[in-house]
Image (cartoon, rainbow, N blue to C red):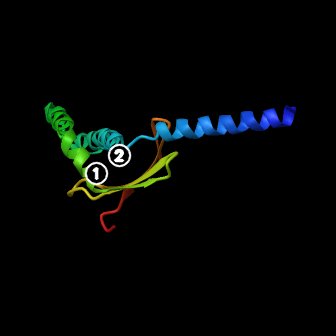
Amino acid sequence: MKNSQLALIVSVLLVTIGTIAFGITNPNKEEYQKYGAAQLSQELQEKGCEKIPQSFGNFLQTQCKLLIEQMNPELQGLIEKNTQRKNFLLFSIYVTDLTLPTPLPSYHFETLAGLNHFWVLKAEEQNSSN
């Protein structure tokens, strides 16, 4: 067997193994919903709870954060209803558009999923007129 044939066989094997690895490690919709709910929870705590006046000390801010943490199942449902998945077998792209009640902002997210990870490609806070 010539070196060029061996190199070709090794290359094909590596590409095949890589393709299988990417396909197997492409996170599913449920994993994205958990990830998205955790990200949304963090954003709501930072942008929403922090706007509560300090007139009662940190009590109301703490209660706000606890309430948001308890809303995780509802946030996952909200993510599920407002997300489209583009599945390319080796990876997926999730597009999420969330319109939240006033005074909270609305958001547009585009997220790449692969290798059991998520990478936010775009995260935009939308104006209330959008």
Name the spot of residue 53 as percent of width and height, x first.
18, 41
Q: Which residue is at 52% across, 45% downward?
A: 90
Which image quarter holds the C terminus?
bottom left
Most foreground residue, 27 or 41: 27
Q: Which sits earlier in the primary sequence, circle 1 or circle 2?
A: 2
Q: Which residue is at 24% across, 51% downward?
A: 78
Observer-side mark, 1 or 2, equals: 2
> SS at mark 1?
helix
Q: Is the residue 14 above or below the residue 78 in the image? A: above
Left/right of residue 11 with respect to residue 67 in the rendered view: right
Disc 2 residue type (three-letter): Lys
Most foreground residue, 41 or 45: 41
The image's mark for residue 29 is 2
Q: Which residue is at 18% across, 40% downward?
A: 71
Q: Which residue is at 60% across, 35% downward?
A: 17
Most foreground residue, 85 or 71: 85
Where is residue 124, by image quadrant?
A: bottom left
The image's mark for residue 63 is none
Name the spot of residue 103 as percent of width and height, x first.
22, 55
Q: Is the residue 116 above or below the residue 112 in the image? A: above
Where is residue 45, by image quadrant?
A: top left
Q: Residues within 10 Å of mark 2 (few under 14, many from 20)?
A: some
What residue sits right under mark 1 in the picture? 80
Does the image show residue 123? no
